Amino acid sequence: MEEAADKVSLYNTRGGWVSRDMLASITDRRRYTWIVSVLALIGVWQAAAMLYGNTFIMPTPWMAISAFGKDAIDPWIHENLLLTIRRVMTGFGYALVIGVPIGYLMGYSMTARRYIDPLIDSLRQIPMMAWVPLTIVWFGLGDGPTVFLIAFVGVFAVILNTTAGVEGISKDYYNAARSLGAKPWSIFAHVIVPGSFPGILTGMRVALGAGWMSVICAEFVATSAGFGFLMVDAQTRMETDRLMGLMIMGALVGFTIDRMLLLTSRVLARWKVA
Amino acid sequence: MRLAMKNISRVFDNGKTKHVVLENVGFTIGTGEFVTLLGPSGCGKTTLLNIIAGFLPATGGTITLNDALVTKPGPDRGFIFQDYALFPWMKVKDNILYPMKRLGVPKAEREERLGQLMALAQLQGKENLYPHQLSGGMKQRTAVIRALAARPQVLLMDEPFGAVDFQMRMIMQEEMEALWLKDRTTVLMVTHDVEEAIYLSDRVIVMSSDRGRILEDIRIDLPRPRQRKGDAYHHYEDRLIDLLKTALGTGPAEEARGDSRATVALASAAQCAAEYTGCAPQELAAMGERA
Ligand SMILES: Nc1ncnc2c1ncn2[C@@H]1O[C@H](COP(=O)(O)OP(=O)(O)O)[C@@H](O)[C@H]1O
Ligand SMILES: [Mg+2]
């Protein structure tokens, strides 16, 4: 009978490999189509640039890419990019520190949820960018408004996903822990925290993504340094090719941040069924 | 060890109507017994077991374990969940060490007991796997030894073979018997499967859909390890199948409800069909094994 049990496990493991292979082939195919799409986009872009014949309004792809290449090795660009990333990380940190405990509370206690839900819902109705003038009044120009905004957009994602993570923990795990001698602290540390972790990781990904998107917007107006400021700077100098190069850089940085977090989740939540 | 249920009642309040699932249910279990609570689906088995575990309060009555009143979950009553409820974020060994850590077992002793339990369940070498990497049978055995790690007085099992297919179910029943014969912790198991009840139990208590009323308390006098054949075995089977029909049948409460009579008759027919189709292949498989 041991043999039969082992057969099942072997089958399961192989099942895992098979599906992973399938996944790899799907990604391969996707990478391939991705290249085709990008080439098509560049083609259309090139055609539009030639049609316009005005490199201020529509620089050629090559101009944007070579501007990007120059910026990629420019220390001044690095400095501003790092400043923006630091703002994102700081705001993200606040979002976590505030959002995770609130999420735990809301996921665990229906009563807490009833009080906090309307609050969150009404705050969320205010368009994010509508906060910018007020935050400039509060914090002045510079880090304050940007960090506030990143924290603010992030905190909802963290709260929502943490709450969902806690709610998703089967009641059986609580009961199992209690009948195995667990006190409330152990239920928190060994059931709620690990059980909601995948949810929190999802929240982190969404929060970082939203943070990166909104920080640039905030930097257009609320600061005189940072990646968003660089873009406004390129615009006022009428360097449209650099502006587009920076847009490409923004996309690449956002993509890298997301992939890094995805990789971290895969490692940290290895126990989740693959 | 003495686990005594006395006049247990449980009413579910569904807004307008009150659903009396259990009324004055009582029985007692002694040391080392493997007792099965057999009853049709929906008769209140899970409800009763959850009350005994302390997961759910009773509306009336008392449960005592060695004369101490049971009010909340505790390590004196181990629980095996239908889908095992192994902590998926802990490796197999951490799942098993978990109750010992909670109960303050010293480290050296913990490690030693871990080794013993892994051997008992024939799981050596699987210590560092996560539950999702185990087969159904291994998960089941892990769940049993995790519960045993807390050194409970009694193991409560809610349809522990309910989630698997027929072949696996028989294999797991055999594994369960083998494990239990080595350990002999008192067990109270819940099932709706006649064959399973006979195969594993020293005693089968038949519960009725009518407020959980206990219809019979039958001792299964068969040598262990059990064989799924022989006159005595089939005699028990026939008797319990008849009893289950009665268990589903219309008691006074059912007649009072009236409207549910058709449903009950239908359910009864379905149950019988399931039971009979369940029997034939089991015998065939048992014979096949022998040949
Ligand atoms: N939380 C609940 N609220 C209302 N009714 C319930 C609840 N839990 C169980 N019941 C009802 O109690 C009866 C017995 O359920 P259960 O104990 O799960 O039966 P079994 O385990 O024997 O199949 C069923 O009719 C079910 O609908
Ligand atoms: Mg049940």
Image: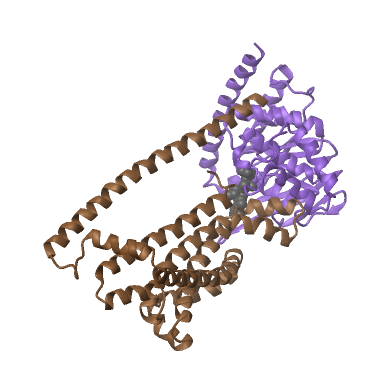
- Residue at x-position 68% and y-position 36%: B126
Quarter for ligand 2? top right
Q: Nearer the viewer, residue A88 or A162?
A: A88
Where in the figure is residue A119, as x and y percent of width and height? 50, 76
Up/down of A103 relative to B130, above or below: below
- Residue at x-position 46% and y-position 72%: A83
Q: Nearer the viewer, residue B103 or A67?
A: A67
- Give the chain letter for brown: A
Where in the figure is residue A153, as x and y percent of width and height? 45, 71
The colour assigned to chain B within the rendered structure: purple
Up/down of B125 relative to A153, above or below: above
Quadrant in the rendering for residue B72: bottom right
Quadrant in the rendering for residue A53: bottom left
Where in the figure is residue A149, as x and y percent of width and height? 45, 76
Which residue sits furthest top? B291
**Image check: B96 left or right of A250?**
right
What is the number of callouts on the image?
0
Q: Is residue A192 visible?
A: yes
Q: Which quadrant is home to the C terminus of chain B?
A: top right
Q: Is residue B20 visible?
A: no
**Image check: A150 left or right of B192?**
left
Q: Which quadrant is home to the N terminus of chain B?
A: top right
Which residue sits furthest bottom? A137
- Residue at x-position 75% and y-position 54%: B73
